[in-house]
Amino acid sequence: MSPLRQALRRADKLQAILEVAKVMAAAHTLDALLPLILREAARVVEADRCSLFILDRHRNELWSRVAQGAKQEIRVPLGQGIAGSVAQTGEVLNLRDAYEDPRFQRDWDIKTNYRTKSVLCVPMRDTHGEVTGVIQALNATDGTFDAEDEELLMALGGQAAQAIENAMLHEDISRLFEGFVQASVMAIESRDPTTAGHSGRVASLTVMLAEATEQATGGPYRDLKFSPEQMQEIRYASLLHDFGKIGVREPVLVKAEKLYPHELEVLKQRFELARKDRQLASLLRRIDAAKIRGEGALEEIEAEEHERLTRELKELDEATDFVLQCNRPTVLAQGGFERLTSLSVMSYNDSRERPQMLLTPNEVQVLSIPRGSLSPTERREIESHVTHTFRFLSQIPWTRTLKRVPEIAYAHHEKLDGKGYPRAVPSEQIPVQSKMMAISDIYDALTASDRPYKKAVPHELALDILKKESDSGQLDKDLFRIFIEADVPRRALKPR
C-alpha cells in the first residue's frame, strides 16, 4: 500500500472515531451504547468482531452484555483471562495467536464454535486515567493487528470510556428518579390505603392508551406519535397525578359515607333516645288512663297503648333505616331524599322534657347529597388536590424531556366542555395526554374494588358511564373509541 493511500486510510479511520464519538455522546443507555461501540471498533481496526468488558470495582470483576456473541451478562474475575489481565495491568496486549497464550480461555470458542486467532486487547481509561474496562478486538482481517490499530483502538477506548461513564451516570440518575417517584406514590397511598394501586393502574392504562392512539389509522389522532421520553413523561404524570392529596385532610380523604362515623353514632343515639322517650310517654299515658278509667280498664288500656307504641316505634325504626340508607353514597346521581324533610320535623323530649329534633338541618343537607359522600365544601377540598399536585410538581427541576409532567397532571380533571376543575379550561387548552389520563382515572375509580364508599362497578357499566360522559362532551370521543377498540383496560390491567 502506498504512503498516500495509507495516510488517507488513517485519516478516514480518525474521522470515523470523531464521528462515532459524537454518536456515543448522544446515547444515554448502555443497551444502545455498547453495541454501537463494538460495531465501530471492529470497523476502525478491521476486526472480525469485538468484545467489551466494564470494570465492577465493588465485586472486583469485569462484566459484559456484549462479548463474543454472548446473549446474557457474563462476568470475569479481575486478573483472569486476557481481558482480566489487561484490566489489572492497564497494558495493551497484542497476540498473533491467542491459543499460544496460557491466559486465553477457550471456553467461549467451544460454546460458540469460533476460532480466535489474533487478539488486540486495550484498556479503557476515564478522564482521570483510571482503567474502567477493556475493548478486545478479535481476528484482524489481514491476520495481525499493528501499532496503528493499537493507537486507534486506544483512542476509541478513551471516547468509549467517557460515553459509558456518562451512560451509567444517566442510568443511575434515572433509577434515582424512578425511586423518588415510587416513594412519592407510596406517600400518596399511605394517606389513603384504600386507593393503593390506583396511581400505578392509571399509569398503565394511560400509557397503553397512548400506545394504542399511535396506531390509529384514522381520526384526528392518526398522526400522533410519542417519543420514549414523552411516554416516560406520560407515565410519571400519571403516577403522580394524585400527589396533592397529601394536602387534603385525612378525614375528608377517606370519608366512606355521607356522615362521619362520630356524626352517625350521635344520630343513632338520638334515635335510641327517641325510642326511650316514646316508651316512657306510653308508660305515663297508661298510668294516667288507669287513674281516670279505673283498674277495670287496664286490659283495654294496655291493648290501646301497645298498638300505639308499636306503631310509633315502627315509624322510628323505618325512619332510622331510611336515614342509614341515605347515608350510603352512590356512584351515579340519585334522588328520593324528599322524605328527609318530613323526618326533620320529628322530635323527642330529653330528660328535662325539652323537645329536640331528630335530624338537624345540616344532617338533612348532608344526607341529601345526590352522588358520592362529600358535601360541597368537602368536594372543593378534595378538588384542591389537583392544585396542590401542580404546585408540588412545579418545584421539581424536571429534565427538558420531562418538563411537561406538572402541566399534564394539572389538567387530568378538566372537561372538554369547560366544566372541569380546578381551572375550567376549554378543550383546546387541555393536553392530549391529560385527556387520556382523564379516561383512565375515571375508569379505574369506577372499577376499583378497594373503595370503602362504593362497590366496584362492572367493566361494561363503567364503559357505559364513560360513554355518557364522552357523548355529553366531557371526555374525548375519539380517545374513548380507541380506549374501547384497543381493549385498553383488559390489556393494561391483565394479570402478569
Image: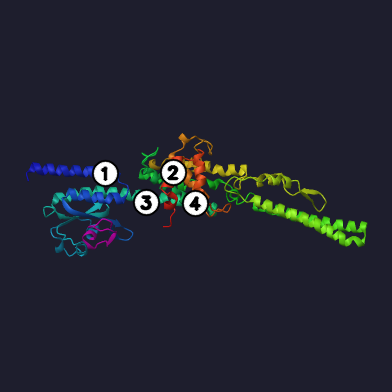
| Residue at mark 4 to residue at mark 2: CA–CA distance | 15 Å
Q: Do callouts 2 and 3 mark residues in contact (Cβ within 8 Å)?
A: no
| Residue 163 in the figure: left or right of residue 137 | right
SS for callout 4: helix
Q: Do callouts 3 and 1 mark residues in contact (Cβ within 8 Å)?
A: no
Residue under numbered circle 3 = 172
Upstream in the sequence, badge 3 or badge 4? 3
Q: Which residues are magenta?
A: 64-84
Residue under numbered circle 4 = 459
Packing grade of label 1 (10 A; few <14, some 14-19, many >=20) is: some
| Residue at mark 3 to residue at mark 4: CA–CA distance | 40 Å
Q: In this orientation, which residue lies closer to the viewer: 170 or 464? A: 464
Residue under numbered circle 2 = 481
Amino acid at circle 1: Val
Upstream in the sequence, badge 4 or badge 2? 4
Q: In this orientation, which residue lies closer to the viewer: 9 or 388? A: 388
Upstream in the sequence, badge 2 or badge 3? 3
Q: Do callouts 4 and 1 mark residues in contact (Cβ within 8 Å)?
A: no
The label shown at residue 23 is: 1
SS for callout 2: helix
Q: Do callouts 3 and 4 mark residues in contact (Cβ within 8 Å)?
A: no
Q: Residue at x 18, y 60 (%)?
A: 114
Front disc: 2 or 3: 2
